[in-house]
């Protein structure tokens, strides 16, 4: 297919009408013509191959040139990038150096300002010291005049030392006086507090004595009341003992009378309750006998109704 396309291309280039050339020839001529066309096509193909190789060589040279230019361009870009980086580094170093120099200048300016203030303060102090010195010169003249008249001291330093010693002694005495005053004040405060505490204690003791006296009076009254109750209880107990003795004597008397009259042989009881049982049984039996005789009409003169009622009550009890 490629050969036919190539052949048609060659024919178009030669501008030969193929149909017109081969219409009136023999088959051998046609075969020869075909071979000739094949040779032409082969030659054209070889020429195209050579042209292709030539163009390929050109393209390769161009490609190598482009690669070389690309490498040169990359190297140029790298150099330019390094140049930019170096410029940035230099710029950053320059900026940092400028900032450091600015900070240093500001610090120096602050130091200068502080030194100026310090110098002004020292100047003021110098003026004050000078003023004090001028005021104290009269004292120096006075001390020199004292040395001229005093044989004990030969130098102003000795006089000042003596004054310092006396002043220290005076300070010690003042301190001792202050301590003694504080001690006296503390002692006075302690005395006042002690007096107040003891006064309060005496008042509390007096209140306690009054309260105890009232309690003693209350206990005495209660004791008198208990004593009265005791006397009353003794009287009641004595009365009851007397009544008990009387009852026991009456019971014993009745018991012996019933025992004498009864036909039953009762034991000689000493317990009042047992004696009362015997008396009760005797009276009950006696009442029953009397009622039977009254009903039978064998009792002469009859029985008073009051006695009959008492006998009935005793039997019921």
Image (cartoon, rainbow, N blue to C red):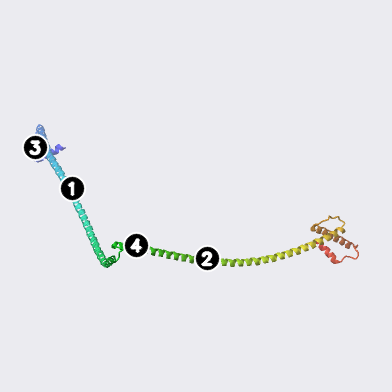
Figure quadrant of the N terminus: top left
Q: Residues within 10 Å of mark 4 (few under 14, many from 20)?
A: few
The answer for how far apart the CA atoms under marks 2 and 4 are is: 48 Å
Q: Which mark is residue 165?
A: 4
Task: Using the rendered image of the protein, determine whether residue 315 is visible from the camera's viewpoint.
Answer: no
Residue 256, quarter of picture: bottom right
Q: Which residue is mark 1?
A: 82
The answer for how far apart the CA atoms under marks 3 and 1 are is: 73 Å
Q: Are marks 2 and 4 in contact (CB under 8 Å)?
A: no
- Whichever of callouts 2 and 3 sits on the residue coming sooner in the sequence is 3
- Whichever of callouts 4 and 3 sits on the residue coming sooner in the sequence is 3
x, y percent for residue 117: 24, 62
Q: Which residue is mark 2?
A: 198
Is 275 in front, or is 220? Answer: 220
- Whichever of callouts 4 and 1 sits on the residue coming sooner in the sequence is 1
x, y percent for residue 127: 24, 65
Q: Residues within 10 Å of mark 2 (few under 14, many from 20)?
A: few
Of badges 4 and 1, the one in the foreground is: 4
The answer for how far apart the CA atoms under marks 4 and 3 are is: 156 Å
x, y percent for residue 155: 28, 62
* Residue at 76 percent of width and 62 percent of height: 241
The answer for how far apart the CA atoms under marks 2 and 1 are is: 103 Å
The residue sitting at the top extreme is 28
- Whichever of callouts 2 and 1 sits on the residue coming sooner in the sequence is 1
Badge 2 element: helix
Q: Is residue 22 above or below residue 242?
A: above
Figure quadrant of the C terminus: bottom right
- Whichever of callouts 3 and 1 sits on the residue coming sooner in the sequence is 3
Q: Is residue 271 above or below residue 83?
A: below
Q: Which mark is residue 21?
A: 3
């Amino acid at each position: 297919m490629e050969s036919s396309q190539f052949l048609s291309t060659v024919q178009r280039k030669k501008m030969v009408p193929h149909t017109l050339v081969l219409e009136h020839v023999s088959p051998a001529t046609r075969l020869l013509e075909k071979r000739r066309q094949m040779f032409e096509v082969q030659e054209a193909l070889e020429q195209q191959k050579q042209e292709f190789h030539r163009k390929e060589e050109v393209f390769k040279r161009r490609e190598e040139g482009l690669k070389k230019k690309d490498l040169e361009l990359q190297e140029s870009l790298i150099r330019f990038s390094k140049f930019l980086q170096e410029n940035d580094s230099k710029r950053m170093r320059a900026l940092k150096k400028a900032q450091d120099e600015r900070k240093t200048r500001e610090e120096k300016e602050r130091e200068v300002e502080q030194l100026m203030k310090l110098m002004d303060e020292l100047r003021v102090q110098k003026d004050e010291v000078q003023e004090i010195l001028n005021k104290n010169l009269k004292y120096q003249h006075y001390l020199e005049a004292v040395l001229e008249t005093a044989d004990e001291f030969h130098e102003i330093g000795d006089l000042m030392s003596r004054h310092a010693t006396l002043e220290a002694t005076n300070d010690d005495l003042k301190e001792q006086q202050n301590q003694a005053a504080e001690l006296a004040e503390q002692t006075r405060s302690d005395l006042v507090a002690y007096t107040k505490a003891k006064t309060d204690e005496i008042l509390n003791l007096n209140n306690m004595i009054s309260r105890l006296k009232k309690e003693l009076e209350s206990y005495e009254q209660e004791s008198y009341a208990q004593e009265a109750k005791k006397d009353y209880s003794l009287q009641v107990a004595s009365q009851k003992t007397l009544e008990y003795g009387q009852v026991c004597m009456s019971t014993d008397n009745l018991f012996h009378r019933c025992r004498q009259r009864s036909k039953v042989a009762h034991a000689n009881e000493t317990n009042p309750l047992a004696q009362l049982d015997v008396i009760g049984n005797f009276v009950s039996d006696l009442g029953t006998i009397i009622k039977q005789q009254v009903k039978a009409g064998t009792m002469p003169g009859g029985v008073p109704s009051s006695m009959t009622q008492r006998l009935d009550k005793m039997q019921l009890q």
